[in-house]
Image: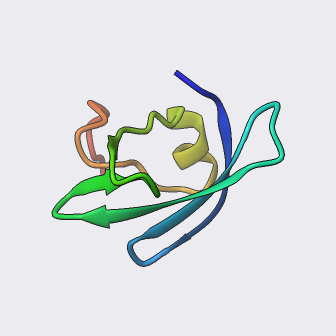
């Protein structure tokens, strides 16, 4: 697992800066799968606090939706 900072998420393209490198990577969402520049499938994990801070909860987070 590698740590990174999300720089941009626009449509189906995500750009991230990898920790301890000068590299910026771009990933594309294809058929519900993120694909690297090397055409390899990748997964991402985001802390729920990121979504809570901006007032949203991702689907399947296990947190009940209260209204």
Closer-to-camera residue (4/40): 40
Residue shown at 20% from the left, 58% from the top: 32
How far across and how far down the image is residue 47, in percent? 54, 32
- What's the coloring here? rainbow
Closer-to-camera residue (8/55): 8
Q: Quadrant of the C terminus?
A: bottom left
Residue shown at 50% from the left, 37% from the top: 46
Residue shown at 23% from the left, 39% from the top: 60
The residue sitting at the front extreme is 38
Up/down of 21 relative to 39, above or below? above
How far across and how far down the image is residue 4, in percent? 66, 39
Up/down of 31 relative to 34, above or below? below
Residue shown at 50% from the left, 35% from the top: 48
How far across and how far down the image is residue 52, in percent? 55, 45
Q: Is residue 28 left or right of residue 61?
A: right
- Find residue 18 and report its image quarter: top right
Q: How many marks?
A: 0
The residue sitting at the bottom extreme is 11
The residue sitting at the left extreme is 31
Q: Is residue 59 left or right of residue 43?
A: left
Q: Is residue 39 left or right of residue 14?
A: left
């Amino acid at each position: 697992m590698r740590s990174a900072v999300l720089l941009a998420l626009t449509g189906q393209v995500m750009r991230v800066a990898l920790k301890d490198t000068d590299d910026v990577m771009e990933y594309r969402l294809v058929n519900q799968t993120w694909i690297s520049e090397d055409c390899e499938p990748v997964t991402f994990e985001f802390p729920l606090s990121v979504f809570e801070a901006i007032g949203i909860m991702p689907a399947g987070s296990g947190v009940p939706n209260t209204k």
